[in-house]
Amino acid sequence: MKPIKLPEETLYSIAQVNAITGVAKPTIRFWEKEFRDFLNPMRTQGNQRRYKRTDINMIERINHLVRTEGFTLEGARRKLDTEYDDEPRAKIPDDDQLAKLADTMSDYLLKKLLEKSTA
């Protein structure tokens, strides 16, 4: 199943996502809770959902797994976990790494300050 080609910068309402995917609005809302790690629409100041192209593609993927391939919700979550497990994720530095970075930056800044004061 090919993802729909939509402009990257466009944001869509839940009604538009329903029209694009054919997935009912209550189902989309339910899947947001069930697939939190994969589906997180933006919210307007009025708390309305706004979906990016990647969100729409994920809704279509979940729909395919559940309705076409017959996965349970738990099975679909596990399948998505394995599919996205290989993708590079930003690593959160540990305390030692942060301390080393802080020392390096402090040394660098002190060196720059000394260069400016002697110039």
Image (tube, rainbow, N blue to C red):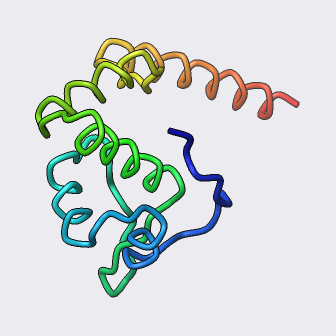
Q: How many marks?
A: 0
Direction right: furthest residue = 119
* Quarter where residue 78 is shown: top left
Q: Residue at x 33, y 55 (%)?
A: 40
Q: Is residue 71 above or below residue 83?
A: below
Q: Is residue 9 above or below residue 72?
A: below
In the rendered image, which quarter contains the C terminus? top right
Q: Residue at x 19, y 71 (%)?
A: 26
Task: Indicate the position of residue 114 as horizontal and vertical percent values.
Answer: 72, 26
Q: Residue at x 46, y 75 (%)?
A: 16
* 70, 38: nearer the viewer: 70
Task: Indicate the position of residue 89 as horizontal and vertical percent values.
Answer: 43, 25
Q: Residue at x 61, y 68 (%)?
A: 10
Task: Indicate the position of residue 83 as horizontal and vertical percent values.
Answer: 37, 22
* 96, 65: nearer the viewer: 65
Q: Is residue 14 left or right of residue 29?
A: right
* Quarter where residue 19 is shown: bottom left
Task: Indicate the position of residue 20 as horizontal and vertical percent values.
Answer: 48, 66
Q: Is residue 114 left or right of residue 26?
A: right
* 117, 99: nearer the viewer: 99
